Image (tube, rainbow, N blue to C red):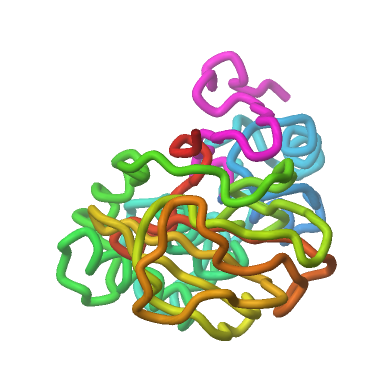
Amino acid sequence: MRFRTAALAGVALALAAPGTTRAAGDADVAALQVGLATHDLYSDVVDGYVGPHTLAGLRRLPGATTLFAPATRAALGTYGANALGSRPLVTGTSGWDVAALQFMLAWHGFPSGRFDGIFGPRTRAALVRFQRWAGIDPIAVAGPRTLAALRLPPPACPLRLSHPIDARPTDGFGPRGSGFHTGIDYPAPAGTPVTAARAGVVRMAGWLPGYGKVVELRHEQGVMTLYAHLSRIMVEPGRAVARGAVVGLVGRTGDATGPHLHFEVRVGGAAVDPAPALD
């Protein structure tokens, strides 16, 4: 079996240091990985990069040829029947094209949970949020206009930000397992001060499911920063805070296996990679 790896420079295996910016992988590669996983042929991260685990799974798939060939999709059965863009995607559809859609939505700041190729309520909600963000009629149908918008580069933070804690990041923005991590994690001892990454106004200070105790700051140009899993909140909604002001203390509230800060940046409601904006 021959694979077109030489022609896939844009989707070659790439590794980024913790907390550094990562390029979005290829949505069709991600869809292939999801399909291989449904056949128990892939158990690594759904990251959209052609690596040894992806190629090993492809070699073990009976009938597969090159990475994106119709024969390879046919080898995946009904899952591979529809390439991305071959039909409108609506609630109830499933398969390769839906997995690719989920991957593209996540990289544009609107993840929908696990990459599973099933257009359910969470994918519908993420799609509607993206369509509103992109100025597209929020009709929950992914057609040509939506896919064209998703093929544009993901949004980025227009502002410079400071690191919100004196700690080394270990888990950055991007795919994690079969899902998507929407921020940067900074493991640190409980009680470590967490500071505002930029001057702003406290939009929210309280509890969010999964995030635990959270502070969210509103900045200019539609930018918001979020500080999660805190053990203690040190500010109140409506308060103006300076860059570097303490907004909370590290904890492990919400869905956290250990004390750390989860830091997110959103632009107009879309989660973006914080790393390129950090000084």
In the figure, residue 209 lies in which quadrant? bottom right
Please tell me how many numbered marks the rendered image carries. 0
Query: In this view of the protein, which residue sits in the foreground, 95 or 81?
Result: 95
Residue 17 lies in magenta, yes or no?
A: yes
Asked if 58 appears above or below 144 in the picture, the reply is: above
- Left-right relation of 116 to 120: right
Q: Is residue 115 left or right of residue 92?
A: right
Q: Quadrant of residue 202?
A: bottom left
* Residue name at image x 60 percent, y 77 percent: 233
The quadrant of the image that shows the N terminus is top right
Compared to residue 1, the image places residue 197 above or below, namely: below
Q: Which residue sits at x=33%, y=42%? A: 159
Q: Residue 105 at x, y = what percent?
A: 42, 58
Query: Does residue 101 appear in this view?
Result: no
Write down the region rendered in magenta: 1-30
Residue 56 rendering spot, x and y as whole percentages: 80, 35
Q: Residue at x 23, y 53 (%)?
A: 221
Residue 138 pos. (x, y %): 21, 74
Q: Is residue 239 above or below residue 267?
A: below
Q: Is residue 185 magenta?
A: no
Q: Main secondary structure of the magenta part?
A: loop
Residue 175 or 10: which is nearer the viewer? 175
Residue 186 in percent (x, y) is at 71, 51
> Residue at 62% across / 59% down in the picture?
194
Does residue 174 appear in the picture of this structure? yes
Q: Is residue 22 above or below residue 173?
A: above
Between 223 and 165, the one lying in front of the other is 165
